[in-house]
Amino acid sequence: MKAASPFKTLMLTLLLIACAVGGFAWYSWNTRTTWPHFPSDPPAAGQVATAEQLAAAKSLAPEVIVTYDRDYGYRIGDLIPVTVYFKEKPGTLIDLHSIAIEGDFEIAQQPVFFERRTKDGARLVRGSIKLQSFSNTPKLTLKANLSYRIIATNDDVTISLPAFEAYTSNTWDGRDIIQEGDLAGKYGVDPYYTIALIFGGIFGAIFFFRLTRRYAREQPVEYEMKALPGRFQLARRDFNDLWARMEAGDRSADRYAEMSQLLRRLYRVETKTTLEASYYLLYSYNGPLQVTEILRACDRVIYRDETLSEEDHAGIKFVFDKLVPQYPPQVLAKLPPTKVAMRSAQATLSGSSYLD
């Protein structure tokens, strides 16, 4: 199979990034900020500013617009989302922490504010506020005040925000007007989770169906032939052979050197002295410390020409049987030979290695 060129790889990467960014933008498109038209905003092309617009442009008072999806059909305890837009004039500073409310509502969650600057130096602020009320009344009212500071004179001025009313009736609240609002169902991300689960289930069904057919075509083999034998099985087989020779009367230094090499090979401490091996096993957690008991007993015969007592000699097998489990003879008989050639203990003492 021909590898893709770097240019094609780059184009594919850019396409994936564009798809991801486009998908995220499409998903969050409804959450974008659509700023309202404030009274002091310049009129559209071809229109003349009214007296109210000119007066609002000259005033330093901030302009506030309150928007909401609907003001009817709420139950007691419902969260009512309200969006408040502020326009802070140049030379003034709105204190968003000075909002004081009165009436039937309370702020249920911490408000979220977003701001941006305009070309003329004004600051636009959008505040997303969640209101909640537990009053059992047909109509819920909210009044709020806000303070702003005139930077030139350092004076604080308090203004009243537009009043907000909401009705708790779920049938008719007595107003002879058609109520409008966003009545579409709010499904959140549940449809996307459902689509992902459907496609994931289809993919999983196809994958495991093909995997089942693949394994059904395979021929069964014996378990022993699927992997190489473990080092503990080899160590048990070699120990049994070596111990049989020792019990037959061959307790020379060469046999104890073979015993030491067997343990060192099993726990991978061939290049370490007995003292180094003890620290290695103790502090690195690479094996049981009882290994060094056998190594010390073998060192007494190899390097000191001592003759172990029957108790010390039997202690070697006692410790080894605790470290390495027993295996059935038919399992040990199938193991390959251990490719290790031993030199004599006397050659080891003279400086030669006993490892092949």
Image (cartoon, helix red, strand yellow):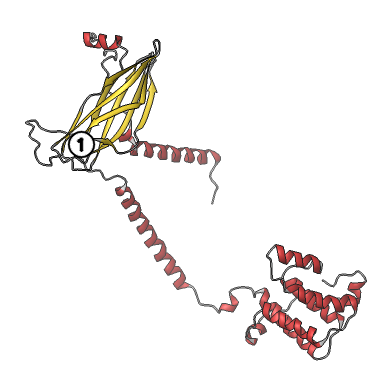
- Measured as percent of width and height from the top left, residue 185 is found at 22, 43
Residue 28 in view, yes or no? yes
Query: Image height check: is 305 above or below 101?
Result: below
Query: How many other residues sit within 10 Å of disc 1, few (<14), some (14-19) or many (≥20)?
Result: few
- Amino acid residing under circle 1: Asp
| Count of numbered labels shown in the rendering | 1
Q: In the rendered view, would you say 330 is above or below 288?
A: below
* Quadrant in which residue 70 is drawn: top left
Looking at the image, residue 253 lies above or below residue 98: below
- Specify the farthest residue to the right: 350
Q: Residue furthest bottom?
A: 248
Q: Residue at x 14, y 38 (%)?
A: 137
Q: Residue 269's spot in the image, x, y percent?
A: 76, 67
Q: Position of residue 102 (x, y in %)?
A: 24, 30
In the image: residue 136, left or right of residue 20: left
Q: Quadrant of residue 63?
A: top left
Whether residue 56 sits left or right of residue 177 in the image: it is right
**Whether residue 340 is visible:** no
Residue 176 in which image quadrant: top left
Looking at the picture, how far across and down is residue 146, in whole percent? 30, 23
Give the side of residue 298 with respect to residue 172, left or right.
right
Query: What element does badge 1 sit on?
Result: loop
Examine the rendered structure and indicate whether residue 333 appears above or below residue 341.
below
Q: Nearer the viewer, residue 35 or 132?
A: 132
Quadrant placement of the C terminus: bottom right
- Tell me the residue that label 1 is attached to: 182
112 on left or right of 45: right
The residue depicted at 72 percent of the width and 74 percent of the height is 290
Q: Nearer the viewer, residue 291 or 74?
A: 74
